[in-house]
Amino acid sequence: MNYLFHYLRKRPGAVGIVIVLTIITSALRVTHALINVNIFNALIKLEFHGFFYWVIIDIAVFAIFLVLMQIQMAETVQLLSLDLRKDIIRQLSGKSIEEFNKQDTGVYASWLTNDVTTIENDGFYNILQSVQIITDPLFSMIALAKFSWTFIPIIALVSFLTVFLPQLIHKRLASASLSTTKANEKLLNVINDSLRGFNTFSIFGVEKQLEARVTETALFLLDKKVKQAKYQSIANNIAGFSNILGQVGIKAWTGYLALEKIISIGVIGSSGNLAYNVFNSLAVIAPIWTEMTALKPIFDKYHLTEKKNYKEEGQDCTENKFDSLEVINLQKKYQDREVFAHPINLCILKNQKVGIYGKSGSGKTTFMKIISGQIRSYTGEIQLNKVELNRLKYSALQKILLYVEQTPYLFNDTVRYNLTLGEDFTDNEIIDALKKANLWKTISNLPDGLNTEINENGNNFSGGQKQRLALARGLLRKRKLFLLDESTSNLDKKTALKVENTFLGLDDATVIFVSHQLHNENKSAFDQIIEI
């Protein structure tokens, strides 16, 4: 429960307004029941003026506060959900690339969508409604005690049954709830994966696989949801039976008291309403408690209490500059298999241009990911500016070097955003970077120029245009060390040479090119050429 209260404390103002409105509404519910005594008695006496007078007051006052409370509660729940999403994203942002990639993106998407919706309904709404669950019975029992103290023992007995019997299936419901969230993660991942692979299905004429894969996973989710609903239904029905038993008992006892002329006949209708307030609230305590406590496994998988930030582990660089990179006996293993045919040894100095080539599968990309800090587990030594690479913060490395991957990811946003990634750059800086990447002519001819929307994963851009945009993204940042991983592989030879020569011509930057085959035309411009 602490995880829910943690978010309530983040929004004291909004939560406070909900609590005040809830208390007022609960008081009005009791007032509504008491007004019913006057309405009933006026009706028995055929006092139509008094009857309609009390009816109008009852409707007007109660309806206004009920609407206000519901609006405020809906807004507050969305604010709490926003805070939760921000915390999840911050936790994900602190992961290393290696750690992040251990889960499919569909899993993370499910955390931020399906799971948050579950927490909204079973957590935030429930914990805010718990104020009403306390105040409704409290005010109603006070009113019933005013009529006759003999109502209290009946309420106490039925309350015990209503609250504690549903706890017998708490653990099973918690387990079923976690299974459902995992099935949601799997479904979202399969949907994303299948939709991204639509072109492949279509090319091979197996479009039916789209339906088959989604249906299979949806049926798995269906089974988990039905199981969760079964346990939830059992808890609700146990509480519901006790609720009905209590209301019938209160009405029967009220009738007896009225026949004995201990209370007026008008109290019969009011006691029914007050009994409903008491037992309906008590009936949902156990299910709501069970739903809220069942959220613990969901919160646990987020690790929100961990303050560890991978990118801030280690030491800072004294200056954002590059002097040297020395690699000594570097080796990396995947499943007990050595990636590099031989341990790597090299030394790269400031402003040098280095070409690295090798056969497919020789470990070129792995090497680039290691020296860019994306892969931290390796044997041997890597000295960046005479400091062991693993001792430096990843955030410090980001200020010195920039890795441009072979297949860059483009966001479903504008060209401008895909270049700046939310950072501040002038139009002149952006245009200059695009010109150096030989892409400005293409972008300037688009209908909206820099504000042209890029489709999902850049489907309206060619492979070569994507690579040049990624290179411009790198040039824009003016790092001291550029790591280009097959970054011109999708370009025609003329364009590739032009772009490569742009980087080779950078006087104040060190550049490491990785390629399966370097161009003879500019080999002489490299200070070193190394085979992996």
Image (tube, rainbow, N blue to C red):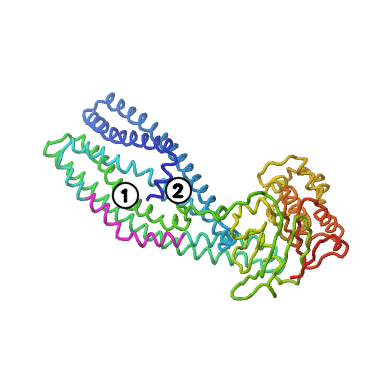
Looking at the image, do the residues carrying marks 2 and 1 touch, with CB atoms under 8 Å apart?
Answer: no
Q: Nearer the viewer, residue 39 or 187?
A: 187
N-terminal-most mark, 2 or 1: 2
Q: Given the image, on which type of amino acid does mark 2 rest?
A: Glu
Q: What count of labels does the image hold?
A: 2
Position of residue 3 measured from the top left corner of the image (x, y, whole percent): 41, 50
Position of residue 1 measured from the top left corner of the image (x, y, whole percent): 37, 50
Residue 51 in the image: above or below residue 401: above
List the residue tagged with mark 1: 285
Residue drawn at x 87%, y 58% is 494
- Of all residues, the one furthest to the left in this rendering is 260
Position of residue 186 measured from the top left corner of the image (x, y, whole percent): 53, 62
Is 514 on the left or on the right of 309, as rendered? Answer: right
Q: Which residues are magenta?
A: 158-180
List the residue tagged with mark 2: 120
Report the Cα–Cα distance between label 2 and label 1.
17 Å
Q: Quadrant of residue 352?
A: bottom right
Residue drawn at x 72%, y 45% is 416
Residue 425 in the image: above or below residue 65: below
The answer to whether residue 451 is seen in the rendering is yes
